[in-house]
Amino acid sequence: MRNQLRPVLAALLALVLPGLGHLSLRRWGRALLWHLTIVGGGVALFALYDVEPVNPLTDPAAVSAAVPTDVAVPIALLSALSALDAYLVGRADAAARERADAAAEAMRRRAASADGDDGLGTVRGPPNATPADEDGGSLDVTCPNCGKEADAELDFCHWCTEPLPWAETE
């Protein structure tokens, strides 16, 4: 449930302050890029149209009259695109996290159902392990996160650096 609300929260935060939605998703580069694009574009448009600054606390009605539509529309459009991007990035992150969780759970179920126990409480290796060479060398397994072959003796995939599911059981 929490993973489903993160994209919506990121989109709302991106509407409040440019880049804030991406910061909540821990996408630092995108946050900086969107913030600089919207703020820099706004400053450039205000300078181009030679708009005089207005104090919104003294005269709130003058604010809407002081900002021409040629300035307000592009800023609003960029803010909407930033919010849409934050939402889509959040959904992609949530989907990737769900796929990784499902793969890890499937790996745990396979490990539990396989006969990996030798009676002494030691585990021979992950369930999808195959010998890398004929003389009993290291075991190779498939990483549930990236799908590449990983060394079963390590607690993490050396390709994507994600922890392997059987590393948590030891």
Image (tube, helix red, strand yellow):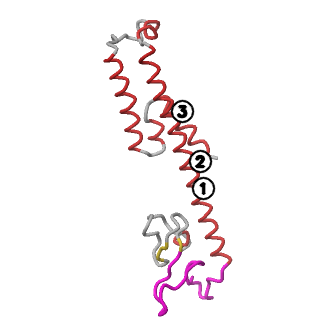
Specify the amino acid type for callout 3: Leu
Start-end of magenta stretch: 114-141
| Quadrant of the rendered image containing residue 41 | top left
Residue 110: % across, % down: 65, 74
User: Residue at the location (62% across, 84% down)?
Assistant: 117
| Name of the residue lying farthest toward the right | 113
Q: Which mark is residue 146?
A: none
Q: Is residue 119 magenta?
A: yes
Tell me whether circle 2 and circle 1 mark residues in contact (CB < 8 Å).
yes
At 62% from the left edge and 45% from the top edge, which residue is drawn?
A: 4
Residue named by callout 1: 98
> Which amino acid, mark 2?
Asn
- The secondary structure type at the circle numbered 1 is helix
The residue identified by callout 2 is: 3
- In the image, residue 81 above or below residue 76: below
Between disc 2 and disc 1, whose residue precedes? 2
Label 2 sits on a secondary structure element that is: helix
Residue 139 falls inside the magenta stretch: yes
Vertical position of residue 89 compared to residue 66: above or below: below
Cα distance between the residues tagged 2 and 3:
15 Å
Residue at the spot of label 3: 12
Q: Earlier in the sequence, mark 3 or mark 1?
A: 3
Q: Residues within 10 Å of mark 1 (few under 14, many from 20)?
A: few
